[in-house]
Amino acid sequence: MRRIVPLVLLLLLLPASAHGTTPDVRVTAFYYPWYGTSARDGSYQHWGQDGHRPPNDIASSYYPARGLYSSSDKGVIGNQMAEIRNAGIDEIAVSWWGQGSPEDQRLPLVLRAAKRWGLQVAAHLEPYPGRSVASTVADVAYLRSLGITTFYVYRALDLPVSDWAAAKPQLHAGGALLFAQTAMAGAAAAAGFDGIYTYDIVTYGGGSFGRICGEAQRLHLLCAPSVGPGYDARRGDGDPRVKPRRNGETYDAMWRAAIQARADRVTITSFNEWHEGTQIEPAVPKCLPGGFCYLNYEGAYGTTGLAASYAYLNRTSYWSSVLGAANP
């Protein structure tokens, strides 16, 4: 098992790209470049959604170990890519909300940092206002010009299957690979997608992976079920549903299920979606003056302190190795 080391030591590691070519993608993590701080961006972007008041009161049930950060900070992005790569993750799927969006503007920075660490970059195409199949065709062409060839389309089947099918030649130009976020393999196949992923770890638990992957692979689709450590969006958007982490047991159970389902690749929800509490990015204990304390990773896999902050990155390294052995 490779160990994830504290951030200060990561800076001493050679980039993965220095050791040869990037291997085939087995593990992908969903990544969010939408955070901002008042010092760098003029306001606390996303940290203050749903009525919260940063820097102490934030829209998350957890508090990041690196503090509130800006996704336009080159140093932060570089350190995140180092953590991701050293966790055995091959690819990040970057949340993208259309041309000209803040996420689009930050994409070149992410691409440069990911390349340095030997990470592949995919686009996670989000349902921005006015999104259509026609606009997605234009989006894919634009993103391909930046070197991106893999696309995860969130809520793809909100749009007509017939429209997707008609656009298949354009969408797949240049060897593009498209995954639809759905458990309905038949509809994804009819729409012309290459594979499916689930993303939502509450709706699609590990018990559904065998069925989902079996149906997908019978239809010659790639199956990329999504695993995650837990879910708690009560402070992020008020969703009362909670999927507890159980000190790491939730994450382990989903990984086991994905491997047993013979997944073609595993997608992780998420590296840093702090609003929904699905992140594996390091977190720390923190309490507000009024008595509220953020959740943290203390006790995960029997760890405490700094080791607990990195517990889920370390465990991702372990499971990435297991997946590689099971699916060489």
Image (spheres, rainbow, N blue to C red):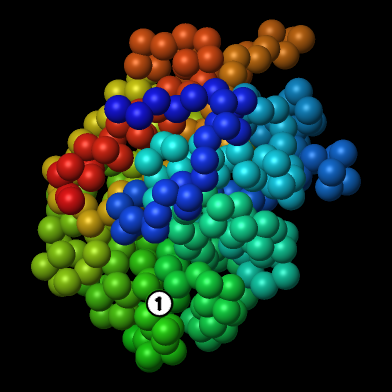
Query: In this view of the protein, which residue sits in the foreground, 200 or 40?
Result: 40
Label 1 residue SS:
loop
Residue found at x 66% / y 63%: 108
- What type is the residue that disc 1 sits on? Ala
Side of 46 where 303 appears, left or right: left
**Quadrant in which the N terminus is drawn:** top left
Total number of numbered labels? Answer: 1
Left or right: residue 152 compared with residue 224: right
Between 94 and 86, the residue placed more toward the observer is 86
Q: Residue at x 62, y 64 (%)?
A: 97
| Residue 83 appears in view | yes
Where residue 98 appears, x then y in whole percent? 63, 70
Where does the image place residue 243, in percent across and percent down from the top left?
39, 30
Q: Position of residue 299 (x, y in %)?
A: 42, 11
What residue sits right under mark 1 in the picture?
A: 176
Residue 182 vs 305, above or below: the answer is: below
Residue 107 screen position, x and y as percent: 64, 61
Query: Residue 270, can we see it?
Result: no
- Residue at point 40%, 17% (across, down): 300
Up the image or down, 4 lies above or below 111; here it is above
Left or right: residue 276 versus residue 227 is right
Give the vertical position of 179 relative to 268 (above or below): below
Q: Along the horizontal axis of the image, is 304 left or right of 275?
A: left
Place residue 135 in its image quadrant.
bottom right
Q: Look at 35% across and 23% down and name the residue there.
A: 248
Question: What crowding class fits label 1: few (fewer than 14 Cα within 10 Å), some (14-19), or many (20 or more)?
Answer: some
